[in-house]
C-alpha cells in the first residue's frame, strides 16, 4: 500500500549522507521499464522557486507531460542556490536518466530541507546509482522511498486505493509535517496510477485534487519554495472513467493531507475550521484561512480556551462581507456565540471537555449566504524547534 | 509629560472593579472646562467593531468633529455584545457628560479587554462620578489615566512634545503590548494638543501619523475589534503651522508605537523589517508585513538563527514583483544573502553576535525599484500566556 500500489511502478530509498544523522535521504519513483508515461505536476505559488521546481517545470514542458521517474532528496532544499543550484538539479536528473536508460528531460526532481546551502553533490551523485539499482515493486520499496523524503515528519505518509469499477489503482507518498523547526515546512507528494489518461486530463484532475486537499491544509501559513505534487500514469490498467479517477485521486490526496495535519511531535491540536453562510465560496475560503492562520486563535485553542471572541475578530478582519450581529461560532458542536453575542444557556462542562480533545472543529456561520469552505490545520508548540 | 502636557486638558484614573485584581481600570481625558473642542479619530478596520468604536464614530459624526472628553475602561472590551453593548457604551458617555456638564455626543468612549462578555455596568457607573471628580492637570493625573488603560502592558506609555516654533504642545498616552495572553491585543491611544486646528485638518494629520506609526506596527498580525486612536485640540496655544503640527503629531505617535513594540515580559526581540528596492511603496509595505508576520521568520529570529532562507521564501510569496536572483538580505548590517544566494565571505562570528541582540533590523532589498517601507514588530514566547 504505497507508491508502488499501481501497476508499472517501482520505488527505492537509500541514505547518501546529505542528512547529518545518517537517515535515508534519497528516493526514487520510476516506471518499471524506464519508459516515460503521461505525467503532471502542481508546484508552489512562491516566486522564490527552488532549483528543482524550476527544473521539473521545464522538463514537463519539454516533454509535453511525460516522465519516467522522479528523484527526490531530503536534508537540503537546493533553494536560493542560483544558477549552480539549477545545474545541480539537472545533474541529478541526468544521472538518474543514465542509470534508468531514459533521457534527462524524462526525470523530475524534488528537494526538501534547508534553504540557501549548496546541495552536497558528491554524496548525491554517489548515491544515485545504488538508489536506481535498488528499485523494486514491493510495498517495502515504496515505504523506503516515503521514509527517505521525511524531514520533520515522525512517520512516512503513504496512501493507496483501488477503483471498484475498472480496477485501476492509485498509490502515493508525501512528506510535510507541522513546523517544529523553522527550517523545513516543504510539502512533497508523488502519486502513481495505472489508469490510462492523457497528460491534460491528468493535470486537470491533479489541480482539482490539490485544491481540495493540500491547498486546504494550512500548517504554518507559509508557502514553501519547494512545494511539489506530481502524478504519473502508467496506463497498465487501461482507460479509466474520468470522473471516477478524479474522485479517487482527490480521496488519496485528502488522505495524505490528513496524515500531514496529524503528524506532529508532542502536544498538538488537529483543527478543522469550517466557515459557512459566507457570501461566496471564495469568501468562505478566505475567512476560514484567516481564522486557521490566526496566531491568537491558535494560542487560545492550544491552551484549550474556548475564546470565541478571537474567531469573531478574525472573521471581521478577513476582508469578506460580515455582519457582527449575525455571526455564530461553535466548537465541536457546542455553540458558543449566536447572533454575535455569547450563546445563552451554554453547557460549560461539555464545552470544557470538548476543548481538551485532540481534534477540534470550529464552525463559524456568517449568516449571509451559501458559501462554505473548510481549512485543515494543526497547532503545536512552536518553540520546541528553537530551544 | 503625559496627556495633560498640552494646555486645556485634565485627566484621571481610578479603579472601579472591572479588573478582578483590583488594578485601576477607568480613565478620563477631558477639556478642563468641559467645553467641546475639535477632535478626530482613527478606528479599527475590523468589521466586527466593538460597541465603543461604533458609539465613538457616531458621536464624532453627530458633532462634526467635536469632543469634550474621552472615557476609557480596561478589563472588558465591550465587543461582541450586540445592542445591549452599544447601550452600555452610550450610558458610559451619558454619565460622563452629566458629570462634566456637556452632552453625551461630546464624549467618546474606548474599551479594552475580554471580548464577548457584557460590561459589568454596576462598577462602571459607580466609578464614573469619582473618576470625573478626581480629574486634574498634573503629570500624575495623566499617568494615572495611562495606567488605568493597561491590560497586558507592563508599564504605562506616555509621550509629550513641545514645538520649537509657536510653542504648541502635544501630549499622549497609549496601551497595547506584545500579546502574552490570547485575550488582549487591542491598541488604544489618546492624544491632546493646544494647537488650534479645525477637525478636518486634525483628522488628516492623525491619519497620516497613524499610517507611519501604529499601522506600521505589527504585534500579532491581528486587527482588534477595539483599536482606536483619538486626538483633541484645545486651541489654547493659537494657530499652529500645519506642517509642523503634522510632524510633531507623527513623532508622538511613533514614540508611543515604539513603546508598544518594546513592552513585553520575558525574552523578546524587537524587530524592524525594512524592505527596499520594491516596485512601489505599496509592494514594499506588503512584503515587509509578510516577513514581519511570518511564523517561520519569527521562530528563527526568536531562536537567534540567521536563517535568511525563510525571509526570501516569504518575500517570494508576498504577492509582489520578485526576482529570486536579485534579492539581498542583511541582519543588523551583516549581509547574509546577495543576489539570491548565500553571501560569500560571511563573518559568522559577527553575525552570531548580532543575532543575540534584543533589537534586530532585517533589511531585504528586492533590487527592482525604489519602493521602501518599514514594519516594526516584536517576538515573544507565545505560549507563556496559555500555560
Image (cartoon, coloured by chain):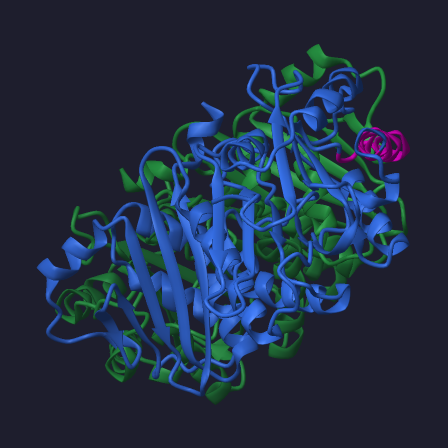
Chain colours: A blue, B green
Q: Residue at x 90, y 52 (%)?
A: B369
Picture quadrant of residue B79: bottom left
Looking at the image, residue A257 lies above or below residue A384? below
Q: Nearer the viewer, residue B300 or A90?
A: A90
Q: Nearer the viewer, residue A90 or B105?
A: A90
Query: Residue A118 at x, y = what percent?
Result: 78, 24
Picture quadrant of residue A114: top right
Lateral position of residue B383 relative to residue A283, left or right: left
Q: Nearer the viewer, residue A307 or A187?
A: A187
- Tally of marks: 0
The C terminus of chain A is located in which quarter? top left
Looking at the image, residue B339 lies above or below residue B318? above
Considering every residue shown, the one lying at the far top of the view is B349
Tell me if residue A244 is in the magenta stretch. Answer: no
Query: Residue B112 at x, y = what percent?
Result: 34, 60
| Res. B41 in view | yes
Q: Residue at x 69, y 69 (%)?
A: A204
Lateral position of residue A209 relative to residue A67, left or right: left
Query: Residue B266 at x, y = what percent?
Result: 39, 29
Which segment did they paint magenta? A79-97
| Res. B262 in view | no
Q: Principal SS element in the magenta part? A: helix
Q: Residue at x 89, y 44 (%)?
A: B367
Lateral position of residue A335 relative to residue B80, left or right: left
Query: Residue A234 at x, y = what percent?
Result: 69, 54
Q: Nearer the viewer, residue B255 or A15?
A: A15
Amino acid at each position: 500500500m504505497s507508491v508502488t500500489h499501481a501497476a508499472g511502478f517501482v520505488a527505492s530509498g537509500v541514505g547518501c549522507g546529505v542528512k547529518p544523522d545518517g537517515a535515508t535521504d534519497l528516493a526514487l519513483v520510476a516506471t518499471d521499464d524506464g519508459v516515460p508515461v503521461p505525467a503532471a505536476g502542481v508546484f508552489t505559488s512562491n516566486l522564490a522557486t527552488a532549483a528543482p521546481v524550476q527544473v521539473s517545470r521545464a522538463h514537463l514542458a519539454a516533454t509535453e507531460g511525460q516522465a519516467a521517474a522522479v528523484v527526490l532528496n531530503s536534508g537540503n532544499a537546493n533553494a536560493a542556490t542560483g544558477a549552480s543550484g539549477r545545474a545541480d538539479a539537472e545533474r541529478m536528473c541526468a544521472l538518474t536518466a543514465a542509470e534508468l536508460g531514459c533521457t534527462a528531460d524524462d526525470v523530475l526532481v524534488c528537494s526538501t530541507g534547508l534553504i540557501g546551502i549548496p546541495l552536497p553533490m558528491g554524496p548525491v551523485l554517489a548515491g544515485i546509482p545504488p538508489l536506481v539499482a535498488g528499485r523494486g515493486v514491493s510495498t517495502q520499496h515504496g515505504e523506503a522511498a516515503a521514509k527517505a523524503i521525511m524531514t520533520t515528519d515522525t512517520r512516512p505518509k503513504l496512501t493507496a486505493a483501488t477503483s471498484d469499477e475498472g480496477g485501476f489503482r492509485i498509490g502515493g507518498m508525501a512528506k510535510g509535517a507541522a513546523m517544529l523547526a523553522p527550517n523545513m515546512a516543504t510539502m512533497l507528494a508523488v502519486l502513481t496510477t495505472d489508469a490510462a489518461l492523457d497528460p491534460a486530463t491528468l493535470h486537470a484532475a491533479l489541480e482539482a485534487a490539490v485544491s481540495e486537499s493540500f491547498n486546504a491544509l494550512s500548517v504554518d501559513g507559509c508557502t514553501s519554495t519547494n512545494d511539489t505534487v506530481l502524478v504519473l500514469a502508467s496506463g497498465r490498467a487501461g482507460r479509466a472513467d474520468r470522473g471516477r479517477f478524479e474522485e479517487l485521486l482527490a480521496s488519496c490526496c485528502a488522505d495524505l493531507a490528513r496524515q500531514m495535519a496529524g503528524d506532529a511531535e508532542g502536544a498538538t491540536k488537529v483543527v478543522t475550521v469550517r466557515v459557512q453562510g459566507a457570501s461566496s465560496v471564495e469568501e468562505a475560503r478566505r475567512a476560514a484561512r484567516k481564522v486557521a492562520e490566526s496566531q491568537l486563535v491558535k494560542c487560545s485553542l492550544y491552551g484549550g480556551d474556548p475564546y470565541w471572541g478571537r474567531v469573531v475578530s478574525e472573521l471581521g478582519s478577513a476582508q469578506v462581507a460580515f455582519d457582527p450581529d449575525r455571526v455564530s461560532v461553535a466548537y465541536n458542536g457546542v455553540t458558543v456565540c449566536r447572533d454575535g453575542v455569547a450563546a445563552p444557556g451554554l453547557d460549560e462542562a461539555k464545552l470544557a471537555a470538548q476543548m481538551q480533545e485532540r481534534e477540534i472543529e470550529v464552525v463559524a456561520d456568517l449568516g449571509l449566504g451559501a458559501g462554505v469552505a473548510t481549512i485543515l490545520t494543526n497547532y503545536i508548540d512552536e518553540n520546541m524547534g528553537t530551544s
